[in-house]
Amino acid sequence: MAVSPIDVVIFAPLAPLFGLLIFWFIQLLFIESQKFLLSKIWKEHKPLCRFTNFLGIFYQTICHALGYTVTRSGISNFFVSVDYGKVTPKKERMGIFEWMSNSFLFIGPFFFPALLLLICFFLIVGIDFDFSQSVQYTFAEGMINFGTNLYIFSESLFNFLINIDLLHPVHLGFLILLIFLGMGIRPSYIGEMKKEKVDMIYDLRNIKSHILHKPIYLFILFLIIYVFFYISFLLQNNWYVLLFSIFGWLSITAIISLLTAHVIILLIKTLDDIPSYWKLLPYLTIPISYIIMRIIFLYYVIDFSNSVSIFVMIFSTVIVILLLLRYKTNKFKSTTKMKQLRVEDGPKRSIRK
């Protein structure tokens, strides 16, 4: 099959960029979903919601400070609160430097927290997987190479998570970091006094305004991307796809972190329906069931003991929650039988014409 020169020269460099945008949009959807869930538990858990908002603003402010550091503007003031964050540069730099600093502010929070988690993951398990080495660049082959690299990384990350050892301090620390990053990977203010609507559309509008404010810089960025692609192509190397694959890994890491935060928030929201101290029982079931299984596997050694312990922990917690919802709430039963309702309402009346 003949390869079109137009495909190689024009469309092939866009393949991994297009794939990255898809994952980034999925990440945005999860962020918006998390904001909706947080709004549902705001009345009962204001401190938690405000803490997640603080985390998000903290990550955003750190990214802005990093932008000033990279552009050598310096930092004269750094301020973070639950509702607001601001970084003041030592030296006001205009032009490309200002554009780069704002890029860190608007786009950095989507990737920088995930970068910290990715570094920790590589420090724990190492980079022991092979990347796609194909260098036949067309748009379709670029998408295949990009998808292959993301699949290999995702498989390694999921294997680590399903076999994670929660009694190992490093693994437990990684899980806690995963939850913390997922809780505040982007600031989304949830409160009674909203000065402005902060949602996915708001974020996209800010990014659009930032990009279109100086279109010449966007053109230069695309020019650099294309030049890097041609260099990789001429040297028969896979650097170009690998670079975008790293950003894809960051999006996947962020999505998994957000999914973990979703599970935590849904657990909290579900247990709010359980009265009194009974709602503490599922929280106690989580560590107790896991520790019991690990003790059992000390004497009866089997393969995949860590993953089996996690499965039993999750299964036990779900069963306990369902039983509490069944017997301690009105979720799955009616307090008054339908037959009794008919008797209380009296005999059925018929209207004659």
Image (cartoon, rainbow, N blue to C red):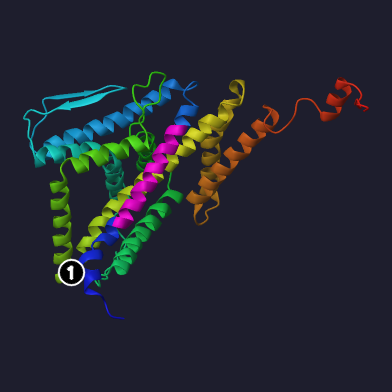
* Residue 12 visible in image: no
- Secondary structure type for disc 1: helix
Furthest residue to the front? 353
Furthest residue to the top? 193
- Residue 31 in the magenta stretch? The answer is yes
Q: Quadrant of the N terminus?
A: bottom left
Residue 24 lies, with reference to residue 33, above or below; the image says below
Density class for disc 1 (Cα within 10 Å; few <14, some 14-19, many ≥20) is some
Residue 211: quadrant of the picture? top left
Of the pair 100 and 160, the residue shown nearer to us: 100
What's drawn in magenta, residue-wise?
18-36
Residue 346 lies, with reference to residue 148, above or below; the image says above
The percent coordinates of residue 174 (x first, y second) are 36, 41
Q: Is residue 114 left or right of residue 268?
A: left
Residue at the location (27% across, 47% down)? 119
Q: Amino acid at mark 1?
A: Phe
Our reading of the magenta stretch's main secondary structure is helix
Question: Badge 1 is on which residue?
Answer: 233
The percent coordinates of residue 281 (x first, y second) are 58, 29
The percent coordinates of residue 26 (x first, y second) are 39, 47
The percent coordinates of residue 7 (x first, y second) are 25, 69
Of the pair 312 and 187, the residue shown nearer to us: 187
Residue 3: quadrant of the picture? bottom left
